[in-house]
Amino acid sequence: MFDVLLAHIQEKVTLSATDVAVLKSFFIPKKLRKRQYVLQEGDVCKYLLFVEKGLLRMYHVDEKGTEHMIQFAWEGWWMADTYSFLSGDVSEYNIDATEDAELLMITLENFEALLLQAPVMERYFRILFQNNIISKEKRLVNTISYSAEEKYTRMAAANPQLLQRIPQNLIASYLGITPETLSRIRKKLMKSK
C-alpha cells in the first residue's frame, strides 16, 4: 500500500530503513468508492491525503449550487484543504472520489510527530510546498491571462492522460468555462488536426 508514496518521496529525498518504518506508522490507509466523500464543506479537514490509486477532486459549491473545481489529485499527489487542516477551522470545500481510490491519510498531530521523528520529511514537505505555491501562481496566471482555448490546450499538454479520466463537465468547471464552450473548443481542435 505504500509503494507509490515511498517512490514519490524517494524522488526528492533519501529515506533510511528507519525513516520508512517511522513513516509507515503514522499513516492510515483508506479506500474510497467513487463519489464517496473524505471531506464535506462545514467540516474540519482532519487529514492530509496521499493518493496511492484513483482520482480525487476538491471543489466548492456556491450559493446557486454550482460546483467550482479547485484541484484534482491522482496517483502520487497530495490533497487537503490546507487552511482547514492547519488552522482547525471549518472547510469551504468538498473532497470526494471521482474514481475508486486508495489513500494514505495523516492527521496534523501525526504529521508534526513524523517531521520530528524523521527530519528528512521536513525537507520533502518543504519541496512539495514550494512546488505547490508555484503551481497555484501558474494557475492564477492561466485563469486571468489566457483564453478558454489556451487554458484547455495548456491543461491537455500538461496532463493528457487525465483528460481521459476526468468527466468533461469537471474539466470545464476547473477551467472556469461552460461545458458548451469546452465542447466547442474540443470540436475546433479536432478539426484542426
Image: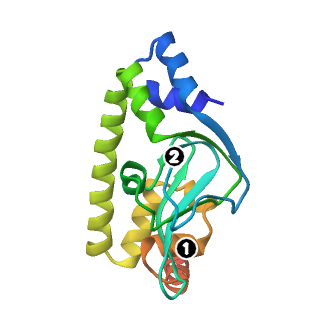
Counting residues from the start of the chain, the first of labels 2 and 1 encountered is 2
Dividing the picture into quarters, in which one does residue 152 lie? bottom left
Residue 47's mark?
2
Of the 4 image quadrants, the one containing the N terminus is top right
Examine the image and state in which quarter residue 179 appears: bottom right
**Display coloring:** rainbow
- Callout 1 environment at 10 Å: few (<14), some (14 to 19), or many (20+)? few
| Structural crowding at the residue carrying mark 2, measured as other residues with C-alpha within 10 Å and reported as few (<14), some (14–19) or many (≥20) | many
Residue 147, given in percent of the width and then of the height, sits at 34, 78
Q: Residue 130 in the image: x percent, y percent?
A: 28, 43
Distance between the alpha carbons at the discs numbered 2 and 1: 41 Å
Identify which residue, 94 or 128, lies in the foreground. Answer: 94
Residue 67 visible somewhere in the drawing: yes
**Residue linked to disc 1:** 190
**Does the CB distance between marks 2 and 1 fall below 8 Å?**
no
- Could you tell whether 69 is left or right of 75 in the image? left
Q: Residue at x 47, y 33 (%)?
A: 110
For residue 13, say whether it is visible: no
Q: Is residue 8 above or below residue 74?
A: above
Q: Amino acid at mark 1?
A: Met
**Figure label count:** 2
For residue 189, above or below residue 48 = below
Callout 2 amino acid: Tyr
Q: Secondary structure at mark 2?
A: loop
Up/down of 33 relative to 102, above or below: below
- Front one among 84 and 145: 84
Residue 53 vs residue 11: left or right?
Answer: right
